[in-house]
Amino acid sequence: MASRVLIFFIRHSALVRPLSESGRLRVARDMAKLELTVGQNLFPVGAPYQALGALRPVIFLETSQLGGSPLLKDLPSSMILHHLSYRAPDELQSPLQRNNLTPLQNSLWLDSQGEDQIWKGIKATLDDYEIKVRARGDQEFSPVYPLMLQISSSLAKSTSPKY
């Protein structure tokens, strides 16, 4: 049960868009409380517990600092990429927005898919964004776009936790 609660909390924290500075502080406070509660009262449950501890500082890193952060190794690639989508401009839709899913539908879909299928959904949003930017004749992308491509490429080669 503790593992499932952590997975849902991490997932939904990574899906919040946009996340203001006060929102970050509230999420970080809730993460700290949850981490303490699980650590004191329940058996800290492996990868989800480590991911919770990693996500809290990640939400405060500048986008440019994320590419080389060792914290990313404790997070599933799909959660990192969803988290990055909150930092993106509105025209780079999250997979939830692109597919017109409710948060519940999206969460159920994420439960039923592997990282490769989730990546395909995220890749489709990145492709849509690239098409929009190129159609306008722009040559510059949001800094989040190449970072999402870089992280997805490097994470695909390594083993990221799956829960």
Image (spheres, rainbow, N blue to C red):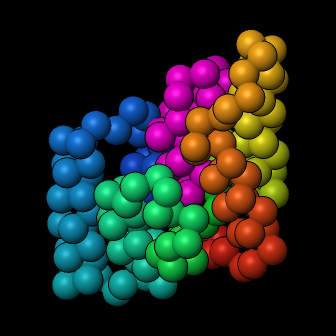
Residue 161 in picture, x, y percent from top left: 63, 75
Residue 89 in percent (x, y) is at: 53, 28
Residue 159 sits above or below residue 18 on the image:
below
Residue name at image x 41 percent, y 39 percent: 16
* Residue 4 belongs to the span the image colors magenta: no
Q: Quadrant of the N terminus?
A: bottom left
Q: For residue 78, which quarter of the picture?
A: bottom right
- Camera-side residue of 135 and 54: 135
Residue pictured at 49% horizontal, 57% vertical: 64
* Residue 105 as seen in the image, left or right of residue 70: right
**Residue visible at 72% across and 79% down in the picture:** 159
Q: Quarter of the image containing the C terminus?
A: bottom right
113 w.r.t. 129: above or below = below
Task: Give x and y (percent) for residue 151.
Answer: 67, 61
Front position in the image: 94 or 147: 147
Residue 105 is one of the magenta-drawn residues: yes
Q: Is residue 163 left or right of residue 34?
A: right
The number of numbered badges drawn on the structure is 0
Along the line of sight, the residue nearer the viewer: 105 or 53? 53
Q: Is residue 112 left or right of residue 42?
A: right
- Answer above or below: position of 116 versus 96: below
Q: Position of residue 41 (x, y in %)?
A: 21, 82
Taking the view exactly as shown, the residue that stands out farthest to the top is: 136
Q: Is residue 17 visible?
A: yes
Residue 5 makes an appearance in the image: no
Residue for point 21% across, 68% down:
32
Instruction: Look at the image and give the residue range highlighted in magenta.
Output: 79-107
